[in-house]
Image (spheres, rainbow, N blue to C red):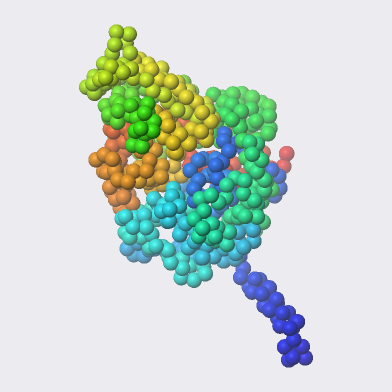
Amino acid sequence: MDCCAKKSRGCVLWFALTAALWGQAAVSQDWLRTSAEVGRPGGKLAIAERSEPKTLNPAGALDRPSRDVIRCMTADLIHINRYTQKTEPALAKSWTSSADGKQFTLQLRQGLRFSDGAPFDADDVLFSFKVYLDPKVHSPQRDLLIVAGQPMTVEKLNATTVRFTFAAPYAAAERVFDSLAMLPRHLLEKDYSDGTINQAWNVAVAREKIAGLGAFSLKQYTPGERLVLERNPYYWKVDAQGQKLPYLDELTFIFVPSQDAEVIRFQAGDTQIISGVNAEDFATLSKDPRTHARLEDAGPGLEYNFLVFNLNDDTEGRLPQVARHQKWFTDVRFRQAVSLAIDRAAIVRLVYHGRGAPLASQVTPGNKLWLDSAIPVPQQSLARARQLLQSAGFSWNKDGDLIDGEHQPVEFSILVSSSSVQRTQMATLAQDDLKKLGMKVAVVSLEFRATNDRILQSHDYDAALMGLASGDADPTPAMSVWMSNGQTHLWHLGEKKPATPWESEIDQLMQKQLVTINYRDRKKLYDRVQEIVAQYLPIICLASPHILVAAQQNLGNFRPAIIENYVLWNADELFWRSP
């Protein structure tokens, strides 16, 4: 008492420290309790990636390897359960919407911390959306946050309550929060202020400079070899018995050059789980008793593989050969002829061994809610393809080679990533089919990053065989692909305005479906988008594989889904059963 009466410095400090500790204890953590099978903690899990991630920055990640790693290190406000495809609470424990469908008020969990121990609150949410909405950042998520031409607004009501306001009712508002990783303001605010946030968090970032709210945090990156994540001690989920998640101590991504190498590492026991197995390897693994594997065919997924022609308008004078070829590519009759020449049924039979589906548009049979079943899958018709080419001014010389109106031979290349055996096979089959029309097509196989750089950066390519897989069955995540100004509008990147009337119509349809609440009305709008894609062929959709996966038999809570990430969507619940 004498000490307090005299207000000695030591006494004041003692009271301050006690109050701080009491305050921390008073704010209990809002755990999210899962309903999955209760597991046992400990152990490590390794999975192969066919390329190294390009970044660990959620605001700039476009490639699948980057997204795979980032998903394990970060968390979103509202999450789409990949298994049930329904929304569920995440960092937000609850939310309400206004009667007009324009406002969503989210209640955050209390007491949450980033993996470096720093507290998470509404200020981090405001900062995260400031980054995602900034046009200078060029985040691929930005398109999802613009409704009726206006970006959403974000308002902090208090430390644990945030209100989001849209310019119009937003049909997929709950779902749009999925995969929008909350960023640590304390680590990235300076980078954002300096205009260097796009350079932040490359794969070689120091451990102390990166933090997230996911189940795992960065432990080690070895270029060309592996990236290791370790258990996040501040993770905010527990199992049904109150045991903290994740169960695993470490999660390792091993970099391999191809699908063949991926399977070899799995058979050797270097990895214990494998995603996106091709049909041939699936058959091989099912007959190999050494692997002790559990294999599952989850049926048609959301991935669509397609041929895309380079329609970018920045090649003239810079890439003269590409620019000359683009005179063919921009004619829809040429693209339609190519589509009719390709035998999709053969692709399913030869590439997928029957475990796949031919496509008419970007929506696969696995997406039963949004597929426009009235659009027929194109059947190979070389006769009709020849008619279209003739109407477009093409002809054939005495050797049967296709020539254009200037008597130049039709020769071009198809770019494909060497990491995908299946897409390489598709490109080769397309090459053989197009040869029947007199086209001379070369298949150019490059490393994944080099392929992406040519398509997304330099535009130094003729055509490419690629694949995309939406993060949700809903059309909204595809805004970036189909909007003319989208960050992944692959055939013509960086458009200031729609280059064609049909692209303008797609823009209008995609914007309208965002604000149409009734499902049937929304589906009519998206059906029309699919019809335009099938008619004008900005991408020529070919086939979709079944989701084929495998894991060691004693891996618990292994529940593959048809939405990415197929096998690691519930990485926090995976555990090793007793041998």
Where is 230 relative to 359, above or below?
below
Image quadrant where residue 419 sits: top right
Image-based side of 355 in relation to 326, left or right: right
Residue drawn at 51 percent across, 65 percent down: 122
Image-based side of 65 in relation to 393, left or right: right
Image quadrant where residue 551 sits: top right
**Which residue is outermost to the top?**
398
Q: Answer yes or no: is residue 175 visible.
A: no
Image-based side of 268 in relation to 543, left or right: right
Q: Answer yes or no: is residue 503 visible.
A: yes
Foreground residue among 549 and 460: 460
Q: Position of residue 234 (x, y in %)?
A: 64, 58
Q: Position of residue 468 (x, y in %)?
A: 44, 37
State how many labels appear: 0
Image quadrant where residue 329 sits: top left
Which image quarter is the C terminus in? top right
Residue drawn at 50 percent across, 60 percent down: 193
Q: Position of residue 5 (x, y in %)?
A: 73, 91
Residue drawn at 44 percent across, 39 percent down: 457
Where is 176 relative to 19, above or below?
above
**Which residue is outermost to the left?**
391
**Which residue is outermost to the front?**
317
Q: Position of residue 411 (x, y in %)?
A: 37, 20
Residue drawn at 45 percent across, 50 percent down: 139
Which image quarter is the N terminus in? bottom right
